[in-house]
Image (spheres, rainbow, N blue to C red):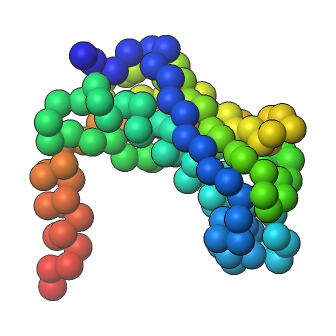
Amino acid sequence: MPVTVGLKGRAEAVVSGANTAQAACSGALPVFGTPFLCALMEEASWKSIAPHLDLGQSTVGTKLDISHDSATPVGLKVWAESEVTQVDGKRLVLRVSAYDEKGLIGQGIHERFIIIDERFLAKAAKKLEA
């Protein structure tokens, strides 16, 4: 079954000391860190797409344009939702949003590309050659 517009995903976590701005070194405060917000949005995206790919294919994130609009303290649940809004060959565009138990905390657009795992890894490995 191919990737189609409207495909939705979700990923969730609980804010702990391990996913705060302090832990990511992206800030000094013990609140849900923006790098972890980005990761949660990407997780919701790739996990929703993966079952629709051929064996040996994956997706890689290439662009993430988001806002992080509200701080979430340690102890609250957070989740991200994604929806495919555009399929242009191997290029996929998704709308992403994130919430905590009190409401919307971030939103934006995420772009991913469908890749062939073996070819992608071979190209990356060439960077190790002298």
| Residue 51, placed above or below residue 125 | above
Tell me where residue 23 sits by quadrant. Answer: bottom right
Residue at left offset 50%, top offset 29%: 9
Residue at left offset 28%, top offset 25%: 52
| Residue 1, placed above or below residue 60 | above
Image quarter of the C terminus: bottom left
Give the number of callouts.
0
Residue at left offset 45%, top offset 14%: 5
Image quarter of the N terminus: top left
> Does residue 25 appear anywhere in the picture?
yes
| Residue 2, placed above or below residue 26 | above
- Measured from the top left, where is residue 49 in percent x and y? 37, 31
Comparing 25 with 120, the one in front is 25
Q: Residue furthest front?
A: 75
Residue at left offset 18%, top offset 69%: 125
Tell me where residue 29 sits by quadrant. Answer: bottom right
- Measured from the top left, where is residue 27 in percent x and y? 79, 73
Horizontal arrangement in the rendering, residue 70 relative to residue 77 (left or right) = right
| Residue 28, placed above or below residue 82 | below
- Measured from the top left, where is residue 83 in percent x and y? 54, 24
- Measured from the top left, where is residue 39 in percent x and y? 55, 53
Horizontal arrangement in the rendering, residue 61 relative to residue 56 (left or right) = right
Horizontal arrangement in the rendering, residue 26 relative to residue 125 (left or right) = right
> Does residue 64 appear anywhere in the picture?
no
Horizontal arrangement in the rendering, residue 84 relative to residue 73 (left or right) = left
Comparing 119 with 29, the one in front is 29
